[in-house]
Image (tube, rainbow, N blue to C red):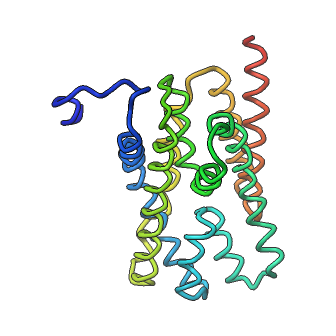
């Protein structure tokens, strides 16, 4: 229990101010930075090792803002891939964000366009998971878009700092340091609490199995195959329970 919970009761969800919603989003996302930060540091180191200039490597974290895509871009750049190949690979890896948007859209349909554009920029794996727990948690609030902004902005700042740290450190970190294992642990931490139904269990099992079976496919195709498998399995399980 937090200190604030002991000192004063939290106002009802419908009466929560924009400021309170924003800082609630910051608080809920912050623990995930312990897993995301090492991943960002590794990207910064890998980008420099791949021959990407410091400014470009940093700009990728601000513009692309997608860890898996940035790692793939660094690897393709180091291998001398054509620009068209790099663009196509990134688009393929990020297709899962279209799935996120489909379930996210009904919750922000009432917002002005400027809010939709801003929140779509911050929609990543971690921010999506944390935000959906809030949106589907049965706590309606007219200011909940400020919560989503707090989640996304916290992740964005953390990713920029981690990337900058990796760029500054360059190749000074020992290669034996298993920082690349931090991201899978982070995903496990955010996905497990969301498995609350039989359909979710089947989706998780199917996607995990396909991800392992297709781990050796090039251009991260295994990630897309796992996403599709999870969708199909979850949909079939949901129909059977109706």
Residue drawn at point x = 50 percent, y = 76 percent: 44
- 167 relative to 201 in the view: left or right: left
Residue drawn at point x = 74 percent, y = 48 percent: 98
Quadrant of the rendered structure where residue 59 is?
Answer: bottom right
- 138 relative to 120 in the view: left or right: left
Quadrant of the rendered structure where residue 237 is?
Answer: top right
- 112 relative to 236 in the view: left or right: left
Picture mark count:
0
Quarter of the C terminus within the rendering: top right
Residue projecting furthest to the top: 242
Residue projecting furthest to the left: 7
- 75 relative to 236 in the view: left or right: left
Quadrant of the rendered structure where residue 172 is?
Answer: bottom left
Q: Position of residue 234 (x, y in %)?
A: 72, 28
Most foreground residue, 42 or 205:
42
Most foreground residue, 224 or 59:
59
Residue drawn at point x = 67 percent, y = 69 percent: 72
Q: Is residue 228 above or below residue 14?
A: below
Quarter of the N terminus within the rendering: top left
Q: Is residue 162 above or below residue 106?
A: below
Residue drawn at point x = 66 percent, y = 65 percent: 69
Q: Position of residue 184 (x, y in %)?
A: 52, 51
Q: Position of residue 221 (x, y in %)?
A: 77, 56
Q: Position of residue 226 (x, y in %)?
A: 73, 45
């Amino acid at each position: 229990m937090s200190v604030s919970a002991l000192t004063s009761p939290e106002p009802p969800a419908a009466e929560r101010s924009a400021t309170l919603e924003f800082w609630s989003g910051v608080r809920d996302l912050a623990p995930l930075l312990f897993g995301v930060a090492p991943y960002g540091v590794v990207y910064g180191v890998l980008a420099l090792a791949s021959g990407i200039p410091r400014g470009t490597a940093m700009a990728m974290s601000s513009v692309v803002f997608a860890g898996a895509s940035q790692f793939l871009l660094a690897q393709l750049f180091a291998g001398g891939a054509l620009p068209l190949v790099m663009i196509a690979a990134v688009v393929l890896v990020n297709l899962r964000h279209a799935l996120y948007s489909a379930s996210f859209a009904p919750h922000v349909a009432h917002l002005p366009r400027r809010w939709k554009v801003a929140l779509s920029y911050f929609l990543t794996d971690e921010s999506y998971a944390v935000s959906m727990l809030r949106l589907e948690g049965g706590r309606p609030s007219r200011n909940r878009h400020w919560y989503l902004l707090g989640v996304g902005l916290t992740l964005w700042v953390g990713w920029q700092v981690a990337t900058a740290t990796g760029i500054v450190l360059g190749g000074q970190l020992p290669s034996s340091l298993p920082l690349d294992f931090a991201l899978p642990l982070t995903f496990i931490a955010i996905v497990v609490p969301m498995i609350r139904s039989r359909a979710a269990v089947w989706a998780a099992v199917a996607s995990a199995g396909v991800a392992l079976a297709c781990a050796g496919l090039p251009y991260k195709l295994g990630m897309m195959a796992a996403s599709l498998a999870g969708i199909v399995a979850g949909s079939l399980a949901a129909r059977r329970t109706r």
